[in-house]
Image (tube, rainbow, N blue to C red):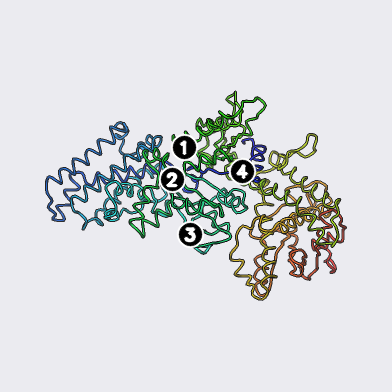
C-alpha cells in the first residue's frame, strides 16, 4: 500500500480554496473509462489503412471491377495500384516495421506497440496516406459504388482487429462503419479528406468510442449517454468549478467526459445567445476563446487541441464549418509544431503558468512542444528569482499526479523547473514533494515491483481526487463557520452571540478535522490524523470519512434549498418536479445554510456521543451513508452494534408519501428516524417522525452542538422517548 499523501494534498487544497489553481488534464485521465490510449488508436488506424490498401491491391480490386462490369482507363488503374503499393512499402521503410510485419496473426498488435511511442509522426504520415487513397478513388470515378466498397472494407478492418482481440482483448467494439461518400464533398480539399478520414477512424464521430451527449436538456438522459464512463474525479473537478474555486480548466483531451461531469453537477452550457446563472463554457477554437474567454463570468473548459462534440456537430450539419474546424483538431506532428502559432492558447497558457499553480493530471509531459512551453516559462521566471536554500520545493507552483514507482522523467523535469521558478534549487533525485502518487485502476497495469495479487489498490487516482475534494470543502466549511456562525446564533436567540458557544463549535469542528487528517496534528495529540486509514479496514473507512462532504452535506444543502424554495414559491412549488433536477448544491450558494449544515453535523455527533456514552468516535459506529439523501448510521458500539438509521429531509404535500417509501433504507436497523424540515422558520426547525410528530427546535439543535444536552433530549432525537411508552 502506498503512503497516502496527506500533507501534499492539504497544501494543494489550500491553494484551491484560495482560487490559485488551474487543472491541466491529459489523455491519461480517461484511460480507465474511454480507454483511448495511443496503442488502441494506432491499431485502429493500422487496421483501416491495411483494409483500404489490401482492397485496392491488384486481385481484390480487379475482381470487384470485373464483377461490376466496370472498365476504367488502364493507366489510371495502374497508377492507383502503383501508389497503393508505394504506401505499403513506405510504412515499412519509414517506420522500420518490416521485421514485425512477418507475424501476420498479431498485426496490428505488434506494430502498434512500436508506433505508440512516436504517434505524432505516424499520425502525420497516415493522414497523408488516407488523402492519397481517397484521391485515387475519386480519379477512378467510383462514386456510385462507394457504399458497397465501404461495407467490404469495414468487414476486412474489423476482421483484422478481431484476430487481435481473441488473445489480447484490446477492443470493446468494432470501428464505426466506414462511409467513403462522406469525404467527397466539394468543400474538402486533398488534405482535408485524409484528415477527416483519420479522425473518423479514431472514433471522433462514434459515440461508442467517445461517449456522451452533454447538451441534452434532461440530466437523466445526459447520464445515460455516458454509459457509466464518468469517474468520481470528473465529478470532483465539476464541484470545484461550481463552487467557484477553479473557474479555468485546461485539457489536451478531445473526449466529452469533463463536460459530462460539469452537466451532471447541475451546470448548463452557456451559448452566445444564452445567459444562465449556473453555466459553463467550452472553449475549443479561437472563436470560442474570444467569445467566452475574456470575461470569466462562467467556468471554462479550455480544449487547446479541439473537441469531439464540436467536430461531430460540424461534420453532421455544415461541410464548410467542418472543413474549417479540421485545423483546430491538433493531432499530427506538424500540427503540434504549429501549435506555437495558436496565440490564443499559447499566450493564455503562458500567462496561467506565471500566475497560477498548475496541477497536471493524466499528463505524461512527453509532448515536446507543450513540455518546452512549461519549461521555458518556468526557466524565465527562475532568471528573475534569487536562489535561496531556505525556499522549499513544496512551494513550487506545480503539482503532478503520477503512478506509484514510476519515475516520469518529463513530469519530474517540469516539477524541478517549477521549483527553480520560485528560487528553490532541488539538489537530489528524491521524488518531488508535490508529486502525488497513485496505483493504476487495474492490478495488471501497476508498475510496482512489490504488488500482491490480493492487495487492495489504495490509493488510486479517484481516491486522491475524492480526498482532495473532502479537504477543500472541509477547509471552506471552517472559513464559513468563522464568518457566519455568530450571525446564526444572533438570529436564533435574538441576542448578541455567545463567544464561548462560538468557540466551542469551532474547536469541536477543528477536532473533527484533526481526526480526519484534514488538519495537521500538533505533537502529543492522542489521535493521529492517519489512524483511520492505517489501522482501519479499507475501503470502508475511507468512504466513511469522505462521506460527510461527498454525500451528507451536499444532500443536506439540497434539502435546505428545497425547503427555502417551497417558502418562496408557496402554492406554485412543485416538489416532484424540483427533485427531478437533483444536482450538486455548493457551499457557496448560501453561506448561512452551509454554516447551519455544519452545526447539524456537530449536533448529531454530540447526540451520538451522549447516547453511546463514548468519548471517542469510531468510524464503524457513526458515519453517513451514500445516497441522494442525508442519512447517518448510528450504533452504540460492540455491546449494541445494531444501528439506528437517521434521515434528514424535506417533504411536502402529496409527494411526501412517495418520498417516505424512498427513504426506507435496506439493511438491519434498530429503527429509522426521520427528521423533517419544518417550513415555519425553515430550514432551522425540524420535526421528528416515527409514528408521531415531535418538534425539534433549532435552539435545541444549537444546544446539542455546543454540548448543552441531556438524556431526554437525546432519546427524543433518536426516537427512544417521544411521549410514547416503550415496547
Give the residue at x 60% y 54%.
242
Q: Which quarter of the picture shows residue 585?
A: bottom right
**What residue would you read off at disc 2?**
305
Q: Which mark is residue 272?
A: 3
Image depth: mark 3 or mark 2 in front: 3
**What residue would you read off at disc 4?**
20
Question: Which mark is first along the chain, 3 or 1?
Answer: 3
Is the C-beta separation of discs 1 and 2 under 8 Å? Answer: no
Image position of 595 with respect to 48: above or below = below
**What residue would you read off at disc 1?**
370
Circle 3 — which element? loop
In three-dimensional space, the C-alpha distance between marks 1 and 4, rounded to whole angstroms, equals: 21 Å
Is the C-beta separation of discs 3 and 2 under 8 Å? Answer: no
Give the residue at x 70% y 54%.
624
Q: Where is residue 562 in the image (x, y as percent from the top left)?
A: 67, 66
Image position of 297 with respect to 573: above or below = above
Amino acid at each position: 500500500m502506498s503512503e497516502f499523501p496527506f500533507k501534499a494534498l492539504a497544501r494543494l487544497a489550500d491553494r484551491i480554496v484560495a482560487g490559485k489553481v488551474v487543472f491541466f488534464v491529459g489523455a491519461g485521465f480517461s484511460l480507465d473509462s474511454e480507454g483511448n490510449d495511443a496503442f488502441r488508436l494506432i491499431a485502429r488506424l493500422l487496421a483501416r489503412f491495411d483494409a483500404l490498401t489490401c482492397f485496392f491491391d491488384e486481385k481484390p480490386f480487379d475482381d470487384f471491377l470485373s464483377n461490376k462490369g466496370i472498365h476504367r482507363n488502364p493507366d489510371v488503374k495502374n497508377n492507383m495500384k502503383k501508389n497503393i503499393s508505394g504506401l505499403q512499402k513506405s510504412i515499412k521503410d519509414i517506420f522500420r516495421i518490416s521485421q514485425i510485419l512477418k507475424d501476420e496473426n498479431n498485426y496490428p498488435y505488434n506494430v502498434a506497440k512500436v508506433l505508440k511511442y512516436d504517434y505524432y509522426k505516424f499520425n502525420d504520415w497516415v493522414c497523408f496516406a488516407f488523402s492519397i487513397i481517397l484521391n485515387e478513388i475519386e480519379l477512378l470515378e467510383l462514386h456510385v459504388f462507394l457504399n458497397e466498397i465501404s461495407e467490404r472494407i469495414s468487414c476486412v478492418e474489423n476482421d483484422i482487429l478481431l484476430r487481435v482481440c481473441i488473445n489480447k482483448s484490446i477492443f470493446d467494439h468494432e470501428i464505426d462503419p466506414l462511409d467513403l461518400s462522406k469525404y467527397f464533398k466539394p468543400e474538402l480539399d486533398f488534405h482535408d479528406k485524409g484528415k477527416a478520414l483519420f479522425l473518423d477512424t479514431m472514433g471522433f464521430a462514434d459515440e461508442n468510442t467517445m461517449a456522451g451527449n452533454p447538451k441534452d436538456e434532461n440530466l437523466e438522459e445526459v447520464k445515460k449517454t455516458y454509459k457509466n464512463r464518468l469517474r468520481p474525479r470528473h465529478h470532483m473537478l465539476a464541484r470545484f468549478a461550481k463552487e467557484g474555486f477553479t473557474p479555468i480548466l485546461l485539457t489536451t483531451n478531445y473526449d466529452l467526459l469533463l463536460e459530462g461531469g460539469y452537466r451532471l453537477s447541475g451546470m448548463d452550457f452557456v451559448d452566445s445567445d444564452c445567459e444562465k446563472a449556473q453555466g459553463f463554457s467550452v472553449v475549443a477554437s479561437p472563436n470560442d476563446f474570444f467569445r467566452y474567454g475574456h470575461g470569466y463570468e462562467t467556468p471554462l473548459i479550455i480544449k487547446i487541441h479541439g473537441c469531439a462534440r464540436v467536430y461531430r456537430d460540424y461534420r453532421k450539419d455544415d461541410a464548410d464549418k467542418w472543413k474549417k474546424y479540421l485545423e483546430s483538431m491538433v493531432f499530427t506532428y506538424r500540427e503540434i509544431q504549429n501549435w506555437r502559432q495558436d496565440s490564443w492558447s499559447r499566450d493564455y497558457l503562458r500567462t496561467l503558468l506565471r500566475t497560477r499553480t498548475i496541477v497536471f493530471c493524466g499528463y505524461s509531459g512527453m509532448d515536446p512542444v507543450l513540455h518546452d512551453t512549461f519549461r521555458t516559462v518556468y526557466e524565465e521566471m527562475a532568471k528573475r528569482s534569487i536562489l535561496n536554500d531556505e525556499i522549499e520545493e513544496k512551494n513550487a507552483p506545480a503539482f503532478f499526479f503520477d503512478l506509484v514507482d514510476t519515475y516520469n522523467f518529463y513530469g519530474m523535469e517540469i516539477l524541478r523547473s517549477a521549483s527553480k521558478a520560485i528560487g528553490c534549487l532541488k539538489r537530489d533525485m528524491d521524488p518531488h514533494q508535490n508529486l502525488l502518487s497513485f496505483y493504476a485502476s487495474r492490478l495488471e497495469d501497476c508498475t510496482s515491483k512489490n504488488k500482491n495479487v490480493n492487495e487492495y489498490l489504495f490509493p488510486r487516482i479517484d481516491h486522491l481526487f475524492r480526498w482532495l475534494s473532502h479537504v477543500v470543502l472541509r477547509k471552506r466549511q471552517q472559513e464559513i463557520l468563522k464568518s457566519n456562525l455568530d450571525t446564526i446564533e444572533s438570529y436564533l436567540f435574538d441576542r448578541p452571540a455567545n463567544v464561548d458557544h462560538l468557540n466551542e463549535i469551532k474547536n469541536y469542528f477543528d477536532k473533527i478535522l484533526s481526526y480526519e487528517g484534514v488538519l495537521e496534528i500538533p505533537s502529543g495529540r492522542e489521535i493521529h490524523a492517519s489512524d483511520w486509514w492505517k489501522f482501519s479496514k479499507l475501503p470502508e473507512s475511507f468512504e466513511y470519512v469522505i462521506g460527510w462532504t461527498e454525500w451528507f452535506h451536499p444532500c443536506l444543502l439540497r434539502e435546505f434549498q428545497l425547503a427555502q424554495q417551497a417558502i418562496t414559491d408557496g402554492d406554485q412549488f412543485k416538489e416532484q418536479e424540483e427533485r427531478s433536477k437533483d444536482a450538486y448544491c455548493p457551499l457557496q450558494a448560501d453561506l448561512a445554510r452551509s454554516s447551519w449544515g455544519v452545526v447539524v453535523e456537530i449536533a448529531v455527533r454530540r447526540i451520538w456521543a451522549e447516547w453511546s456514552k463514548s468519548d471517542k468516535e469510531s468510524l464503524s459506529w457513526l458515519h453517513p451513508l451514500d445516497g441522494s439523501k442525508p442519512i447517518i448510521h448510528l450504533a452504540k458500539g460492540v455491546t449494541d452494534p445494531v444501528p439506528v438509521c437517521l434521515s434528514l429531509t424535506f417533504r411536502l404535500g402529496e409527494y411526501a408519501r412517495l418520498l417516505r417509501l424512498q427513504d426506507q433504507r435496506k439493511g438491519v436497523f434498530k429503527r429509522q428516524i426521520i427528521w423533517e424540515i419544518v417550513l415555519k422558520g425553515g430550514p432551522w426547525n425540524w420535526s421528528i417522525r416515527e409514528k408521531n410528530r415531535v418538534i425539534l427546535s433549532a435552539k435545541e439543535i444549537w444546544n446539542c452542538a455546543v454540548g448543552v444536552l441531556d438524556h431526554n433530549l437525546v432519546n427524543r432525537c433518536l426516537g427512544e422517548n417521544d411521549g410514547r411508552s416503550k415496547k
